[in-house]
Image (cartoon, grey):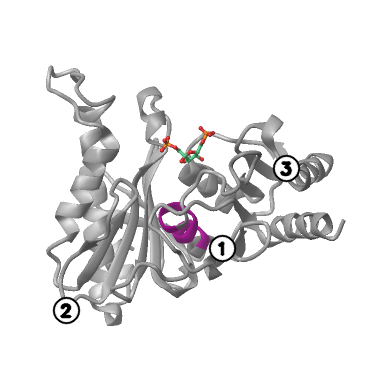
């Protein structure tokens, strides 16, 4: 079954929006050969390269801004919200190319997208009506949810997204993917990681959030980019990384937390807001919240 057949017709513009983003994902993928590397260098064809994340951002903004049902666009690459159609119903938030610093060494990167049915993107993640990510690895895959399970498609040789997994559920394997510098971890976080290690969790961290979380969805476990000494909000962004991936994992039976609460309940205050992240299976997330609570009560 193809993506356009899988998306229900009664979602109207939401279906069209997701299909449009899926086509833009193909343009981003095709751009890798021309745009690898950093700005102002030349690619293998002698053409001047642009930074790939800026280029991917432009592909998405140019491809979405004139759709009549799009009210606003917010990108990790931009300082301000782009307000679009006055009659638009949807706000789209995106990280055009998560993990882009890994492109130069040919590791997996991805596009992360969140969708609200509200012109205002400063809404809690739980209010999303859809979220998706496109992963550019050995295969290009697209995973989406509109609140009824999460579903994964693979881009075939004819350019169609073909259903590969329906109603994916977070796996049961013991994997932990810990970001940030160990010497700067906070005590409760150190205890959490020690518990994971004692229980036999295996370390897997590739440096691309979207790829790491994709692995956790398929296999199980937990990804974390925590608060640390001097960085009390961690590194990753609430609107562009945490919320869409959190909404997706929530609909795969998992959870996302900042250590204290469900990230999807946070009301964003600014576009570039960061948040400490724990994302994965419900069991692992409850363990970290337990360790954090213990620390607060000491
Ligand atoms: P880039 O998009 O600059 O490559 O950053 C990737 C990222 O935001 C996220 O995808 C990774 O999990 C995290 O940063 C890795 O950060 P460290 O380099 O500190 O491990």
**The quarter of the displayed image where residue 261 is located:** bottom right
Q: Who is closer to the viewer here, 17 or 148?
A: 17
Numbered label attached to residue 263: 1
Q: Who is closer to the viewer here, 68 or 258?
A: 258
**Residue position marked by numbered label 2 in the rendering:** 87
Q: Residues within 10 Å of mark 2 (few under 14, many from 20)?
A: few
Q: CA distance from mark 3 to mark 1?
A: 19 Å
Q: Secondary structure at mark 2?
A: loop
Which comes before the other along the chain, label 1 or label 2? 2
Side of 130 relative to 261 (left or right): left
Q: Is residue 103 above or below residue 250?
A: above
Q: CA distance from mark 1 to mark 2?
A: 30 Å
Q: Which residues are magenta?
A: 239-246
**Residue 75 colored in magenta in the image:** no
Of marks 3 and 1, the one in the foreground: 3
Question: What main secondary structure does the magenta stretch of the protein show?
Answer: helix
**Residue position marked by numbered label 3 in the rendering:** 186
Query: Pointers 1 and 2 in contact (CB under 8 A)?
Result: no
Q: Residue furthest bottom?
A: 10
Residue displayed at 49% across by 72% down: 126
Relative image position of residue 108 (x, y in whole percent): 42, 36
Relative image position of residue 145 (x, y in whole percent): 42, 66
Q: CA distance from mark 3 to mark 2?
A: 47 Å
Q: Secondary structure at mark 1?
A: helix
């Amino acid at each position: 079954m193809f993506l356009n057949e899988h998306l229900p017709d009664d979602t109207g513009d939401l279906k069209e929006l997701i299909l449009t983003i899926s086509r833009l994902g193909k343009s981003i993928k095709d751009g890798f050969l021309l745009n690898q590397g950093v700005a102002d260098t030349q690619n293998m064809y002698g053409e001047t390269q642009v930074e790939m994340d800026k280029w991917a951002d432009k592909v998405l903004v140019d491809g979405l801004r004139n759709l009549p049902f799009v009210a606003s666009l917010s990108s990790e690459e931009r300082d301000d919200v782009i307000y679009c159609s006055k009659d638009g119903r949807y706000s789209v938030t995106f990280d055009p190319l998560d993990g882009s610093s890994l492109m130069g060494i040919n590791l997996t990167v991805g596009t992360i997208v969140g969708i609200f049915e509200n012109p205002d993107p400063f809404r809690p993640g739980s209010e999303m009506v859809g979220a998706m990510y496109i992963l550019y690895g050995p295969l290009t895959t697209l995973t989406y949810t509109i609140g009824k399970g999460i579903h994964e498609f693979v881009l075939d040789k004819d350019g169609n997204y073909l259903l590969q997994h329906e109603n994916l559920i977070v796996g049961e394997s013991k994997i932990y993917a810990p970001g940030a510098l160990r010497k700067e971890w906070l005590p409760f976080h150190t205890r959490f990681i020690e518990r994971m290690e004692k229980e036999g969790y295996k370390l897997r961290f590739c440096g691309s959030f979207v790829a790491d979380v994709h692995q956790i969805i398929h296999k199980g476990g937990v990804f974390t980019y925590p608060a640390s000494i001097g960085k009390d909000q961690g590194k990753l962004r609430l609107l562009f990384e945490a919320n869409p991936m959190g909404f997706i994992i929530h609909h795969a039976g998992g959870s996302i937390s900042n250590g204290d609460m469900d990230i999807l309940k946070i009301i964003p205050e600014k576009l570039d807001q960061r948040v400490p992240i724990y994302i994965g299976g419900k069991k692992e997330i409850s363990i970290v919240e337990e360790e954090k609570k213990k620390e607060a009560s000491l």
